[in-house]
Image (spheres, rainbow, N blue to C red):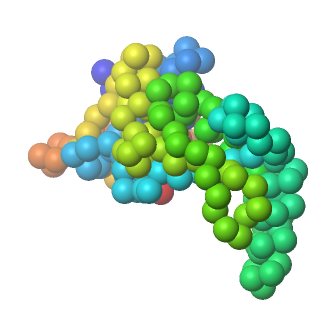
Amino acid sequence: GNQADIIVVGGGGAALAAAAEAAKLGARVIVVEKNRVLGGSTRLAVGLMMAAGTRIQREAGIMDTPRHYDAELTRIAKAQGVAGNAELRWLLARNAADTVDFLESIGVDFIGPLEQPPFKVKRYHQALPDGRAYVHHLHRLCDSLGVEIRLRTRAKRLLLTGARVTGIETESARGRVRGLTARAGVILATG
């Protein structure tokens, strides 16, 4: 159909994770991706994640915390003369472990934790073989949750009802223009 509770624009790692979460919460979800394959830049990524407080670290006997990770990020940024954004650093530090644990729970295999200078604690978690692992397992999760994925479908513009976004206009690879309605919202995850 042309209606869903949630429409996700983009087919990379963030988009697939958002689609899966919405579907877990009971939403009917449509993902639209302009390319022939899912993955976006996630598919091209090395697949490493720096994270503090993961199950993998605990199993290796490494006691680490998001606060310690944040302090190291801040120290390294200052040493490199980069002010950065303290709020965003803390957002990363406090959520990275949950992300690694979630990805592991859906089947992503990691090696590590490994050293990554100039960090003093082993926090480097490497997905095997690379970022394609994230895409593969997130796609499987979305399929198991009934997420509808439309490849080779370009989002052209947001559709508004008053000031509220209520859907998107799409164009297929063959040039067919169609409107999709989102009852609860549109998530833009286009990188």
Question: Is residue 168 rendered to the left or right of residue 97?
Answer: left
Identity of the residue furthest to the bottom in this view: 81
Residue at image position (37%, 56%) is 44
Residue at image position (78%, 85%) is 81
Question: Is residue 122 rendered to the left or right of residue 64?
Answer: left
Residue 105 in percent (x, y) is at 56, 25
Q: Is residue 68 above or below residue 85?
A: above
Pick whichever, 170 or 117, lies toward us: 117
Q: Is residue 10 visible?
A: no
Pick whichever, 138 or 111, lies toward us: 111
Pick whichever, 75 or 61, lies toward us: 61
Residue 188 in percent (x, y) is at 51, 47
Residue at image position (42%, 48%) is 131
Identity of the residue furthest to the left in this view: 174
Q: Is residue 7 above or below residue 123?
A: above
Question: Is residue 30 rendered to the left or right of residue 114?
Answer: left
Residue 123 in percent (x, y) is at 68, 51
The image quadrant where one finds the N terminus is top left
Which image quadrant is residue 18 in? top right
Residue at image position (40%, 16%) is 144
Pick whichever, 114 or 94, lies toward us: 114
Identity of the residue furthest to the front in this view: 61
Residue 178 in percent (x, y) is at 27, 38
Q: Is residue 138 visible?
A: yes
